[in-house]
Image (spheres, rainbow, N blue to C red):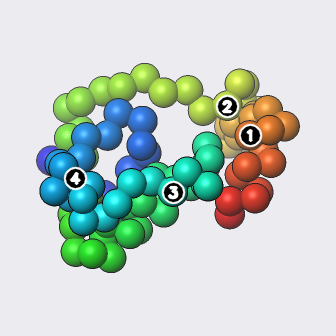
Amino acid sequence: PIEASCIISSGMAVRKNILDSVGVMDDSLFIDYVDTEWSLRARYLGNLILVDPQLVMGHEIGTDNLKLFKWRVPVHSASRRYYRIRNS
């Protein structure tokens, strides 16, 4: 495993004792930033966030991609954009 600063909640596994000390994810941050906030809280309490690069999970971001110069930008629904802005 390699250390990461943050991890997405989809597909993550957490030991019960870590979950007990850090607490559950803040559901008021529905959709976006629940995992970022939880990761920051876990790290603040001295926990490591580890990723196993050999594990693979498919996860789509957005409903489409917009090509902007050399970058691809995910296109989200209006409700997803609302929560991204509200929670950031």
- Name the N-terminal-most of marks 2 and 1: 2
Q: CB of mark 1 within 8 Å of CB of mark 4?
A: no
Residue 35 location (% of width, % of height)? 46, 52
Residue labelled with disc 1 = 80
Name the disc covering residue 38, or none. Answer: none
C-alpha span from label 2 to label 4: 25 Å
SS at circle 4? strand
Q: Amino acid at mark 2?
A: Gly
Name the disc covering residue 62, or none. Answer: 2
Residue labelled with disc 3 = 26
Q: Quadrant of the C terminus?
A: bottom right
Circle 3 residues within 10 Å: few <14, some 14–19, many ≥20: few
Image quarter of residue 73: top right
- Name the N-terminal-most of marks 1 and 4: 4
Q: Give the left or right position of residue 29, taking residue 37 as reference.
A: right
C-alpha span from label 1 to label 4: 28 Å
